[in-house]
Amino acid sequence: MAVRIFRDRAEAGRDLADRLGAFAGRSDVVVLALPRGGVPVAAEVARALGAPLDVFVVRKLGVPGYEELAMGAIATGDVRVLNEGIVASLQIPPYIIEAVAAQEHEELLRRERLYRGGRPPTEVRGRTVILVDDGLATGATMQAAVEAVRQRKPGQIVVAVPTASRDTADRLRRLADTVVCVVLPKPFQAVGASYKDFAQTRDDEVRDLLKRAEGPADPAFVVAERQAAKPEAADFTGTDLAATDLSSLESAIVPLRGDARDYDPLLALIGEARFVLLGEASHGTQEFYRERAEITARLIREKGVTAVAIEADWPDAWRVNRYVRGDSDDLDAVEALGGFRRFPTWMWRNTEMVDFVEWLRSHNQTLAPGVPRVGLYGIDLYSLHASMKAVLRCLDRLDPGAAEAARARYACFDRFGESGQVYGFMTGLKGVGSCQEPAMAQLLALQRRTRDTLAWVCSTDREELFNAAQNARVVQSAEAYYRTMFLEEESSWNLRDRHMAESLESLIAHLSGQGSPAKVAVWAHNSHLGDARATEMSERGELNLGQLMRERYGRAVYSIGFTTYAGTVTAASDWDAPAERKRVRAARPGSHEALFHALGAGRFLLPLTPGSPQADLLRPARLERAIGVIYRPDTERRSHYFRACLPDQFDAILHFDETRAVTPLEYTAGWESGEVPETYPVGL
């Protein structure tokens, strides 16, 4: 029998309402939606039942350092629920709980204001409460919501969802009075698998649905509210700015002419910042790699930067680190980059990266004895199995007893094979346990024992012990990342960027322990380094590395975004597909890139100093393009654009109007031939 697939959340809500007919027309019923995905479903339920609709905001209280592990939750109406088992087993002190709760309370209040305005929460005492979400995977948020609503003394609690894991539904039946579910897929894969359209629900959609549920509104007010919430750029061919404003922007740019002093103004702007974040608008543009390398070389020579942290897996980058520091047997940079064999290989195995790695090694060879050598480090988390092997190799050499204990812990992963995605999928199925606890236990064991390196192994090999501890951190984070990517809409992104931030923090502490405070250049995509609070990401509850670094270090961080208008890029059409040299379409009207193209300057630096005329002119949100390892021109607006307030996102912009694809070290005839132009065979 075919499994029911809903067209979208609205259709799922109508089907769910049919199952709730017994509650129609009752004055004691109230429908509470879990935002954001639950609101379109609940809106249909409330309309069909003739019941009032409201949101019930729940915020998980994550264990510090392991935020994906919930020690409790807070919810609408100053309700707090604690997982006493987690709190007791981890011996979490009350002041930690209070600190986390205070932080999450701020976000809860923000969402309350955003969704409800000044309205108080709907009274539920003595009433029948129907809690609605778009589906249940682990059910952690719904469980917290049930427990929180229970504290407000309702007459009855009904959990209603279109789709759910059978296991989760059974567990919730022990907590709620009634559980209503349209489909219980077997096997259950993910909530999104029950929908044809499972696009992210936006905050403005939530507000609109809640307003409609209140009753007729003044159409002019609704239009004005939407325009205020998300300014829409005009459909223009180049810019929506007046000629005088364009002239003001033109006077602020610093042309890049290709000479040795091009970046003097940028280094002056960077000043004494300890952390320079160098972005990119794609993972396959030659100019982005080349210019980052040139800027980084000057930061190393002139500003005392001692580390380059890149959006790459730790063990593969560690091999390159050993090469540039003169500690490896690799013959050259091409061989040192040999660890980067996982898709997308071209991201770090490319000709520009070879040149930079060789420069870095040569620079280190010129340093006097005792002067710290510059290292290159990875801060990403995809190397689940490679990092486990690296931990075991290090411990086998330094402490065989600890290696045996680590091998026993990591054996949990053996039954899932080598794929992290398979691990994530399988652990979401009924009766399949995860490896969360052994991964965490190994990280904690290494962290405890490396606090006193000499007492542990009678060795001064501080670098290798740091390498082992970082690999254990990767295993713990990768386990959580793959496990959550099939269960929740957003948490895997946040977990990944938190891991990047934690890895950077560990690196900073490690390097600072060798003398003066560390200075680091960070290479990653604009979407990781530009402050998420200035983009649509924040509306989805997402954060990123750039935001976390600014929150932690303030003005010690200087963030530089890179943009392009058109050209070519190395990218794939699908995950794990071959690299292609693709043509980058001209930037869309209404975008920052189209505006920069209209200036006619080609290549330039644009400082976004707060209070400057150019920062004020660029403050209205516009479209910004982001090309990752996959580029799909046919769905470019949906797949590669988002809205951003550029002066709040970056401290400066480097724009290269026409760019070229980076050259992979290994490429196919398909890459060499490139993409056929749209005008073929008519245009010339």
Image (tube, helix red, strand yellow):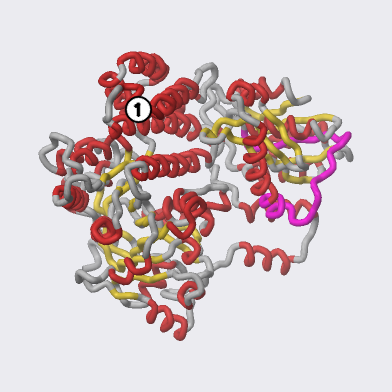
For the point 67% across and 52% down, the residue is 110
Q: Position of residue 293 (x, y in %)?
A: 25, 56
Q: Is residue 26 visible?
A: yes
Q: On the rendered structure, is 456 left or right of 534?
A: left
Q: On the rendered structure, is 342 left or right of 232?
A: left
User: Would you say residue 87 sits in the magenta stretch?
Assistant: no
Examine the rendered structure and indicate whether residue 154 appears above or below residue 554. above
Q: Position of residue 21 (x, y in %)?
A: 79, 33
Q: Quadrant of residue 319?
A: top left
For the point 41% across and 60% down, the residue is 558
Q: What's drawn in magenta, residue-wise?
A: 110-135
Write down the residue under mark 1.
453
Q: On the rendered structure, is 214 left or right of 289?
A: right
Q: Indicate the secondary structure of the residue bearing disc 1.
A: helix
Q: Position of residue 256 (x, y in %)?
A: 27, 72
Q: Position of residue 254 (x, y in %)?
A: 33, 75
